[in-house]
Amino acid sequence: MSQENLNTLRRLFEAASEGDVSVWFQGADPDIRVHPRSEEPDAAEEYRGLDGLMDYLLNWYSQWDFYESEPLEMIDAGEHVLVVARERGRVERTGMEVVEDFCHSFVVRDGKVLEWHMYDSRADALEAVGLSE
């Protein structure tokens, strides 16, 4: 796993947690493909390109009064980098506070995210990239 890929992902997570989601557009390939969890409210199965990334992020962040995602672990999975992240937030509609760990897999080339997949668990993410616990 290249240090550049790790630095790219750390920068994206840190900036987003500080409220700067514009960094996702700087770090995304123009043909990015985003695959949310199937359980995610009001999410499409796939978003494509920078317009799709905008649609996804608007949908996701519109659900929260407060939201942050802290990377706990990064795992080299060949072409993919898995990120286990602790996500915290307060749901806008209910005021309910949520703290949960989710996994993301990213394909990063030349400092740009080409693919972003989201999973409910580490086991699901590992399986999706051909690894197991």
Image (cartoon, rainbow, N blue to C red):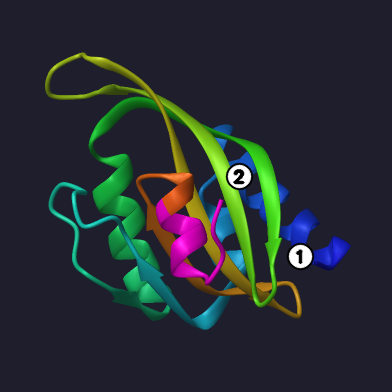
Q: Is residue 119 visible?
A: yes
Q: Give the residue displayed 77% in from the left and 57% down from the top.
A: 6
Q: Mark 1 highlights which residue?
A: 5
Res 13 label: 2
Left or right placement of residue 115 versus residue 109 in this view? left
Q: Inspect the magenta stretch and tell me whether residue 66 lies in it.
A: no
Q: Position of residue 10 (x, y in %)?
A: 71, 48
| Image quarter of residue 75 | bottom right
List the single residue furthest toward the front: 133
Query: Which circle's residue, 1 or 2, is located before the other in the chain?
Result: 1
Q: Position of residue 44 (x, y in %)?
A: 19, 66
Q: Inspect the magenta stretch and tell me whether residue 130 lies in it.
A: yes
In this rendering, the answer to whether 113 lies above or below 42 is: below
Task: Write down the region rendered in magenta.
Answer: 124-133
| Image quarter of residue 117 | bottom left
| Image quarter of residue 111 | bottom right
Q: Residues within 10 Å of mark 1 (few under 14, many from 20)?
A: many
